[in-house]
Image (cartoon, rainbow, N blue to C red):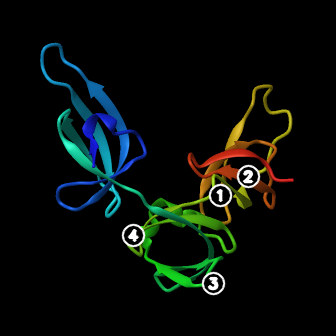
Amino acid sequence: MIDATQIRKGMILRMDDGQLCRVQEMQLITPGRWKAMVQTKLRSLRDNSIRDYRFRSVDRVEQVHLDEIEMEFLYRSGEDYVFMNHQTFDQVFLTAEVMGEAAKYAIPNVIFVIEMFEGRAVNVAPPTTVELKVAHTEPWMKGATAAAQFKPATMENGLVVSVPAFVQEGDILKIDTREDKYLERAR
């Protein structure tokens, strides 16, 4: 148990109802003569809902530590995503609900970080960057403008990213998974 004033962004907390939440934002408020408060924005690990929660400075809350295991995505089996643990070679089946936003980067042989709590997966984090092939984009008209131009490109996994005008179909690009943003052409 920690004091509410020790809460930091990124921590996992067990709330009174038993739900696990990740701290998205945290602000310590000290309003003059009143007692300090900690205003937080919490994301539920169960259903990804976000809620605001205010702790009094005297409140105590349970901090939970998750086991982070690197696993390789293998394939989809119906509605489930199949991952393999490289240490034990066990295969784990995860639902689309657990995958959340990481599902759009479920490409075979990509290593994900699976956060486990009491033997079950509660969160899936894709790698910071992935290399994806451009499936479709409009052709570039050379000399159309002197300023930098961007155009939409549909990647092999269906993700649409804004890319520079020189990118063509078939190019392999590095994509930042945190912001779904083009970084550079892969070498």
Q: Which residue is mark 4?
A: 97
- Are the residues tagged 1 and 2 within 8 Å (C-beta)? no
Q: Nearer the viewer, mark 4 or mark 3?
A: 3
Q: Which is more foreground, mark 3 or mark 2?
A: 3
Instruction: Answer with left or right where residue 171 lies relative to residue 116.
Output: right
Residue at image location 41% in from the left, 75% down from the top = 119
Question: Which quadrant of the structure image shows residue 143?
Answer: top right
Amino acid type at circle 4 is: Glu
Instruction: In the rendered structure, find residue 174 and report the number of the disc placed on it.
Output: 2
Residue at x-position 23% and y-position 54%: 15
Upstream in sequence: badge 4 or badge 3? 3
The mark that comes first in sequence, 1 or 3, is 3
Q: CA distance from mark 4 to mark 1?
A: 24 Å
Image position, residue 142 (x, y; %): 86, 38
Q: Is residue 151 left or right of residue 104?
A: right
Residue 146 position, x and y percent, is: 80, 25
Q: CA distance from mark 4 to mark 2?
A: 26 Å
Identify which amino acid the numbered label 1 is placed on: Thr
Mark closer to the chain start, 1 or 2: 1
Question: Do the CB atoms of the residues marked 4 and 2 lie less than 8 Å apart?
Answer: no
Marks 3 and 1: in contact by CB < 8 Å? Answer: no
Distance, label 1 to label 3, CA atoms, is: 34 Å
Can I make out residue 157 in this image?
no
Q: Which residue is mark 1?
A: 154
**Mark 4 or mark 1, which has the lower sequence index?**
4
Q: Mark 3 sits on what residue?
A: 89
Name the residue at the top extreme.
Answer: 32
Q: Residue lying furthest front in this view?
A: 1
